[in-house]
């Protein structure tokens, strides 16, 4: 999307200015956050329209498979512990 290209150019311009001056540039953090939010919004629209699909699992959604051997010798898969 063209608006994302424009926002990326703004971020890169401010970043280069900051590197050259070796001082913080007012507005760079805001520009980066705006760019991030814009990309997330574009991705959400693509998902909602069915133009893109989710190809990765949800981080942290894996089931805990810890196994515990109890003193009596029984094996518990971690449920209820």
Image (cartoon, grey):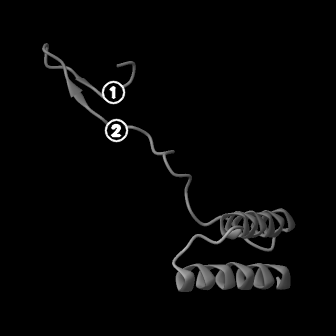
Q: Position of residue 64 (x, y in %)?
A: 39, 37
Contact flag, marks 1 and 2 (Cβ < 8 Å)? yes
Figure check: 63 above or below 33: above
Where on the picture, by quarter, is residue 33?
bottom right
Q: Position of residue 63 (x, y in %)?
A: 44, 40
Q: Which residue is mark 1?
A: 78
SS for callout 2: loop
Residue placed under numbered mark 2 in the picture: 65
> x, y (%) of residue 18?
58, 78
- Mark 1 or 2 closer to N-term? 2
Q: Secondary structure at mark 1?
A: loop
In the drawing, what numbered circle is on residue 33?
Answer: none
Circle 2 residues within 10 Å: few <14, some 14–19, many ≥20: few
Residue 37 drawn at (x, y percent) = 74, 63
Task: Report the front residue among 15 and 54.
Answer: 15
Quadrant of the image containing the C terminus: top left
Instruction: Tell me: 35 left or right of 66.
Output: right
**Residue occupying image coordinates x 62% and y 83%:** 17
Tell me: residue 62, above or below residue 77: below
Q: Quadrant of the N terminus?
A: bottom right
Question: In screen coordinates, is 27 left or right of 60?
Answer: right
Q: Quadrant of residue 29?
A: bottom right
Picture residue at 64% right of the left edge, 72% below the top: 25
State which quadrant residue 16 falls in.
Answer: bottom right
Which is more toward the observer, 68 or 75?
68
CA gap, disc 1 to disc 2? 7 Å
Q: What is the crowding at mark 1: few (fewer than 14 residues within 10 Å), some, or many (at least 20)? A: few
Left or right of residue 71, residue 5 in this image: right
Q: How many numbered dots are placed on residues in this image?
A: 2
């Amino acid at each position: 999307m063209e608006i994302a290209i424009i926002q990326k150019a703004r971020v890169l311009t401010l970043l280069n200015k900051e590197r050259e001056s070796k001082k913080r540039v007012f507005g760079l953090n805001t520009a980066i956050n705006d760019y991030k939010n814009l990309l997330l919004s574009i991705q959400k629209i693509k998902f909602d329209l069915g133009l893109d699909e989710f190809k990765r699992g949800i981080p942290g959604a894996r089931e805990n498979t810890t196994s515990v051997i109890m003193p009596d010798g029984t094996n518990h898969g971690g449920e209820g512990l």
